[in-house]
């Protein structure tokens, strides 16, 4: 189980997802955090988005965020509808490895395409109106363009977020100039409250990741109360990136902004990575713990040394059992 909240409006997209993975054999929480949000950025056509999910957190020793990266890798020209279709088609194959009683699953996909906010679910159990049914044998897609107001969608344990909380989130998203930290902070608070509710046992962690995406394509993420090192996966133009692969994005995009997950780790680790990059002549123009995009300047000859330095500075995250 998990808790995933999506807030989609013409003025912004926000997602949150807790870190909990549960061992289905023992019913006990796994002893490490799992990121359940995957940022997306494509150049042909140009669009940005976020994926979160609830249901199956790992299968065949592979966390679902890593699986998303693998099935999207090598497709640099996916449109939003193409990406949704890949998740549906490949997801059916992937879920066939999971016992039927554990197969309920939903991918939440939110994106800005040509300035419009889109929201889709790829699911075998949920519906966009907030209802759920029996688990279908195959994944299906429901989607909408959010042209007015705000859509608040909760998956995992929907009853953990009540109507008043959803209305509060929608009202925040519809404000003309919302405070940049207001919605991520509220999502973190709601996640903590749900985790503290005895009705939901140990199925929701206190900590969570929240992500924000604005219509101009800029975004950032926040890590709330992590208990272990946490480095999310992201997909940029068909390349799947953890921290050790992030320099591929710089190579692809040239000397422009690139998603760099140095910022999604504790401050001392982020600084260690910056120091390593500086040693091989890469200038980090700006760094902050509350943003998921940085600008780096480098010469192509520095790429190999920089990759080694970045690998050395950030430890691998624990694999799922």
Image: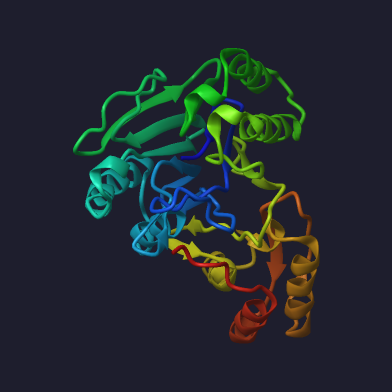
Please give the name of the residue rendered at 73% of the width and 85% of the height, measured from the top-left corner: 280
Specify whether residue 76 is in view.
no
In the rendered view, would you say 32 is above or below 18?
below
In the rendered image of this protein, does residue 94 appear above or below residue 174? below
Its colouring scheme is rainbow
Q: Position of residue 299 (x, y in %)?
A: 65, 80
| Residue 130: quadrant of the picture | top left
Total number of numbered discs in the rendering: 0
Q: Nearer the viewer, residue 300 or 213?
A: 213
- The picture places residue 181, in percent across and down from the top left corner, at 75, 35
**Which residue is at the front of the view, 126 or 28?**
28
Residue at 63% in and 74% down:
315
Which residue is at the far front?
A: 26
Q: Between residue 120 and residue 113, name the one nearer to us.
A: 120
Q: Residue at x 69, y 18 (%)?
A: 175
- When the figure is inspected, residue 144 is found, relative to residue 51, above or below; the finding is above
In the image, is residue 105 above or below residue 302?
above
Question: Is residue 199 rendered to the left or right of residue 125?
Answer: right
Decide if residue 17 is in sight here: yes
Q: Position of residue 242 (x, y in %)?
A: 54, 65
Residue under the point 66% across and 53% down:
292
Q: Quadrant of the C terminus?
A: bottom left
Q: Is residue 53 left or right of residue 123?
A: right
């Amino acid at each position: 189980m998990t808790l995933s909240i999506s807030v989609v409006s013409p003025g912004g997209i926000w997602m949150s997802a807790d870190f909990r993975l549960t061992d289905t054999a023992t019913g006990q929480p796994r002893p490490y955090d799992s990121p359940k949000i995957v940022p997306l950025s494509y150049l042909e056509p140009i669009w940005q988005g976020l994926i979160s999910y609830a249901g199956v957190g790992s299968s065949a020793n592979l966390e679902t965020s890593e699986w998303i990266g693998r099935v999207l890798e090598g497709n640099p020209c996916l449109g939003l509808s193409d990406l949704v279709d890949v998740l549906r088609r490949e997801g059916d194959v992937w879920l066939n490895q999971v016992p039927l009683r554990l197969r309920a699953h939903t991918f939440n996909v939110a994106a800005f395409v040509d300035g419009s906010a889109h929201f889709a679910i790829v699911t075998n159990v949920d519906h966009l109106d907030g209802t759920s049914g029996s688990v279908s044998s195959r994944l299906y897609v429901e989607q909408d363009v959010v042209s007015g107001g705000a859509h608040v969608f909760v998956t995992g344990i929907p009853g953990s977020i009540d109507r008043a909380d959803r209305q509060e989130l929608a009202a925040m998203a519809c404000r003309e100039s919302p405070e940049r930290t207001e919605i991520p902070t509220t999502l973190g608070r709601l996640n903590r409250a749900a985790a503290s509710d005895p009705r939901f046992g140990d199925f929701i962690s206190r900590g969570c990741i929240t992500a924000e995406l604005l219509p101009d394509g800029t975004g950032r993420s926040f890590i709330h109360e992590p208990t272990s090192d946490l480095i999310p996966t992201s997909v940029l133009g068909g390349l799947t990136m953890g921290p050790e692969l992030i320099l591929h994005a710089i190579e692809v995009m040239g000397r422009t902004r690139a998603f760099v997950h140095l910022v999604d780790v504790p401050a001392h680790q982020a600084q260690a990575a910056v120091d390593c990059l500086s040693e091989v002549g890469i200038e980090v123009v700006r760094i902050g713990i509350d943003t998921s995009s940085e600008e780096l300047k480098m010469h192509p000859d520095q790429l190999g040394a920089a990759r080694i330095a970045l690998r050395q500075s950030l430890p691998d995250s624990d694999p799922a059992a």
